[in-house]
Amino acid sequence: MQCMKCGAKAEKGYATSVTDLGSCLLIIRNIPCYKCKECNEVIYTGEVVKRLEQITEQAKQFTQEISIVNYSSAA
Ligand SMILES: [Zn+2]
């Protein structure tokens, strides 16, 4: 995988995503991604992006102020 920003090599890793949904803060952990070694750009595959959207939609129904979701265990 190549970094879209700087063209350097991006390696497989895990990322944490923090999204402010207004009513709550959504934290998704252990998201499989590619990370650029040069500029730290995080790249998600299309499949992962879809999954993250699903998790975000579900999280909007939560009433907690802070939701911490583990990517791999999210339904
Ligand atoms: Zn880069």
Image (cartoon, grey):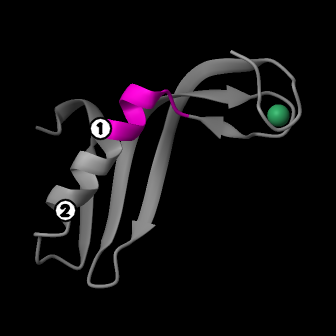
The answer to whether residue 57 is visible is: yes
Name the amino acid type tagged 1. Answer: Arg
Distance between the alpha carbons at the discs numbered 2 and 1 = 12 Å
Q: Is 13 or 21 nearer to us in this picture?
A: 21
Q: Is residue 57 above or below residue 52?
A: below
Query: Image quarter for residue 46?
Result: top left
Residue lying at 31% horizontally and 49% vertically, measured from the top left: 53
- Relative to 57, is 53 on the left or the right? right
Residue lying at 29% horizontally and 38% vertically, measured from the top left: 51
Name the amino acid type tagged 2. Answer: Ala
Q: Give residue 39's position: percent from left, percent from top.
A: 84, 40
Helix, strand or loop at label 1? It is: helix
Question: Is ligand 1 closer than 8 angstroms to the Cβ of mark 2?
Answer: no
**Disc on res. 51:** 1
Tally the marks.
Answer: 2
Residue bearing mark 2: 59
Q: In which quadrant of this rendering is ligand 1 seen?
A: top right
Helix, strand or loop at label 2? It is: helix
Q: Give residue 42's position: percent from left, percent from top.
A: 64, 38
